[in-house]
Image (cartoon, rainbow, N blue to C red):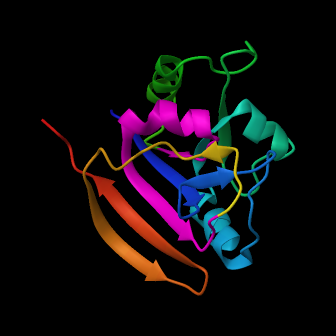
Amino acid sequence: MKVKFIAIAALGKKREIGLNGKVPWNIPDEYANFKESIRDQVVLVGRKNFDHHGQRIEGAKKALVLSKNNSAYFQTMNQILEYAEQNDITTIYVMGGAEIYELTLPYLSEFLCSIVDYEGPADAYFPEYLFYEWEILDQEIHDNWTLYHMRKIPNY
């Protein structure tokens, strides 16, 4: 069985995702969509992001924490893949931070990408993802953001 990785992220117009450990905008309906998307799902998150959420990801079924510096958590993608296989996990939502998105980009099958109306200061950015080909499966336009549900087109 192969696990499907789905990234879920809100990006500013220049791929901004964070400033001083926080999201640099406040768009309640986008955040509500994020929470609904991960409800009862297994999520993959970095240690800093996990700590920021109070070591609990609201609504998620289970959080898998990836950290290169803390042996209490998973330290490699191979460990995540083995764990998923051993526990019959078919889908994992990747919810950041920036290093985790960078590390998982080659593994992604899908991307739930909210592009928000923000162009400003940031110290964390989503990695360049457009060097992969993506097919837009769905698009929802909202007041301050647009949600794109995309599938990565495999390159054989």
Give the residues drawn in magenta, as a range: 92-119
- Relative to 104, say whether 86 is above or below: above
User: What residue occupies the far bottom of the structure in this picture?
Assistant: 143
User: Percent position (x, y) of residue 74?
Assistant: 63, 20
Q: Left or right? Give the position of 144 relative to 108.
A: right
Residue 3 vs residue 127, the one in the foreground: 127
User: What residue occupies the far right of the structure in this picture?
Assistant: 54
Residue 7 lies in the magenta-colored region: no
User: Percent position (x, y) of residue 79?
Assistant: 53, 18
User: Can I make out residue 66 in this image?
Assistant: yes
User: Which residue is at a point 61% across and 81% down the rendered structure image?
Assistant: 144
User: Can I make out residue 88 in this image?
Assistant: no
Q: Quadrant of the C terminus?
A: top left
- Relative to 126, say whether 111 is above or below: below
Residue 104 lies in the magenta-colored region: yes
Residue 97 vs residue 93, the one in the foreground: 97
- Relative to 108, say whether 152 is above or below: below
**Quadrant in the rendering for residue 51:** top right
**Quadrant in the rendering for residue 28:** bottom right
User: Which residue is at a point 39% across and 46% down the rendered structure image?
Assistant: 129
User: Percent position (x, y) of residue 10?
Assistant: 59, 61
Q: Quadrant of the N terminus?
A: top left
Residue 132 vs residue 37, the one in the foreground: 132
User: What residue occupies the far left of the structure in this picture?
Assistant: 156
- Relative to 100, say whether 77 is above or below: above
Q: Left or right? Give the position of 59 relative to 153.
A: right
User: Which residue is at a point 62% across and 43% down the rendered structure image?
Assistant: 96
User: Which residue is at a point 22% across and 50% down the rendered structure image?
Assistant: 153
User: Percent position (x, y) of residue 54?
Assistant: 87, 44
Q: How many marks?
A: 0
